Amino acid sequence: MGDHPLDPVRVELTMALARDLGVLDRPGVVLERAEAATDAMLATVHDPDYIAVVKAASTGRRISMMAWAPRTTRPSPACTRRAP
C-alpha cells in the first residue's frame, strides 16, 4: 500500500469492510460514482509539475523525480527553525 490516504487498495479494503458490516445496506446510504478530477481541480491541491510527473509515470514512462523535486519541495517552517 502507498502512503496516500486514498490509495486504491485502502479504498477497496474500506469498501469491502463496509459491505461486510452492512453499512452500505443501511437506509439512506447511496453509492455514487465520482467523476475523474480535471487537471484544474488537481492543481488546487497539487503542484502542476507534480501532476505532470504522476501522469507520465502512469503511462509507464521512466521519469526523473530529481527534475521535479528541487523546484517544488520546500521545507516546512518547523524544519528550518533552530532550537533555542
Image (spheres, helix red, strand yellow):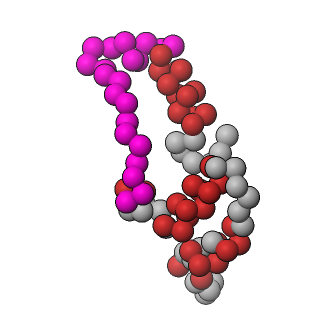
Point 31% across, 20% down: residue: 29
Residue 70 seen anywhere in this rendered image of the structure? yes
Towards the viewer: 51 or 72:
51
Left or right, 12 with respect to 2, comes to left
Place of residue 4 in the rendered image (x, y in percent of width and height, measured from the top left): 57, 48
Q: Is residue 59 above or below residue 45?
A: above
> Magenta stretch: residue 52 in it?
no
Q: Residue furthest left?
A: 28
Question: In this picture, which residue range is highlighted in magenta?
Answer: 20-40
Point 57% across, 41% down: residue: 7
Place of residue 72 in the rendered image (x, y in percent of width and height, measured from the top left): 56, 74
> Magenta stretch: residue 37 in it?
yes
Point 53% across, 33% down: residue: 11
Location of the N terminus (image quadrant): top right
Q: Is residue 68 above or below residue 19?
A: below
Place of residue 75 in the rendered image (x, y in percent of width and height, measured from the top left): 59, 76
When asked about the image quadrant of residue 36, the answer is: top left
When asked about the image quadrant of residue 34, the answer is: top left
Residue 75 seen anywhere in this rendered image of the structure? no
Q: Is residue 65 above or below residue 61?
A: below
Point 55% across, 28% down: residue: 12
The prevailing secondary structure element of the residues shown in magenta is: loop
Towards the viewer: 63 or 73:
63
